[in-house]
Structure formats: C-alpha cells, structure tokens
Amino acid sequence: MKVSQALTLLPNVEQTVNTKAVDKALQQTNDSFGAMLNKAIGDVNSLQSEASKAVESLVTGEAQDLHEVMIAVEKARTSFDLLMEIRNKTVDMYREIMRTQV
C-alpha cells in the first residue's frame, strides 16, 4: 500500500476511535487513582496518629493494655510499609514507561 492510500484511510480511522471517550476514561482513571492514593495516605496518617496517642497514653499510665498499644503500633507500621511498597511500585512503573521508546 502506498503512503497516499494510507493517508486517505486516516479520516476513517479517526471516526472509528472515539477519542473524547478515551480521554474521559483516562481522566476518570487518573482521578480515581489519585483519590485512592490520597485516601490511603490519609488512612496511614490517622493510623500513625492513633498509634502515637496509644503509646503516649501507655507512657502516662492512662492505658493499661500493652497488647492494644502494640496492635495499634503494628497496624500503623504495616500500613506504612504497604504504602511505601505502593510508592516503590509506582515509581518503578513510571521509570519503565520513561524507558519505553516511542
């Protein structure tokens, strides 16, 4: 096929692909991923705040249950570790995309 023949088919291809729908879907995906990431960061932050308060209450003598304090601390640590893994994977994906030749 010659280039001139291929160029005549280009308008037909553009009509079959609904670029506005694709752009909208990409925007929704970006919004939902960003919202999910913000929610996860907020959740980790609140778990760490709760763990800090639990440790503080144990040190001041207000809390008597060491196991509840340890559970709160481990929840905060585990959620932070998970958030860091998500960040690491996201950075790795970004680097892989940047290495891709177009």
Image (tube, rainbow, N blue to C red):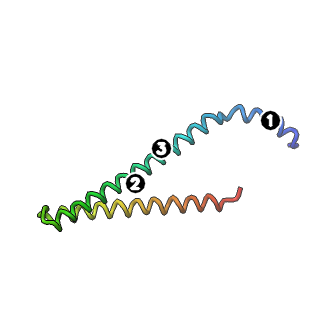
The spot of residue 44 in percent (x, y) is 35, 56
Residue occupying image coordinates x 88% and y 40%: 4
Disc 3: CA contacts within 10 A as few (<14), some (14-19) or many (>=20): few
Residue in the foreground of this view, choosing between 7 and 62: 62
Residue under circle 2?
41
Instruction: Give the spatial CA distance, label 2 vs label 3.
Output: 14 Å
* Left or right: where 8 falls relative to 39: right
Label 2's element?
A: helix
Can you tell which quarter of the image residue 7 is in? Answer: top right
The spot of residue 40 in percent (x, y) is 39, 52
* Left or right: where 10 falls relative to 94: right
Label 1's element?
A: helix
Q: Earlier in the sequence, mark 1 or mark 3?
A: 1
Residue occupying image coordinates x 37% and y 61%: 80
Q: Earlier in the sequence, mark 2 or mark 3?
A: 3
Residue in the foreground of this view, choosing between 36 and 17: 36
| Numbered mark located on residue 9 in the image | 1
* Left or right: where 9 falls relative to 52: right
Residue occupying image coordinates x 49% and y 61%: 89
Disc 2: CA contacts within 10 A as few (<14), some (14-19) or many (>=20): some
> Quarter holding the C terminus?
bottom right
The spot of residue 85 in percent (x, y) is 44, 62
Label 3's element?
A: helix
Identity of the amino acid at label 2?
Ile
Residue under circle 3?
32
Identity of the amino acid at label 1?
Leu
Identity of the amino acid at label 3?
Ser
Instruction: Give the spatial CA distance, label 1 vs label 3.
Output: 36 Å
Instruction: Give the spatial CA distance, label 2 vs label 1.
Output: 48 Å
Can you tell which quarter of the image residue 11 is in? Answer: top right
The spot of residue 92 in percent (x, y) is 54, 62
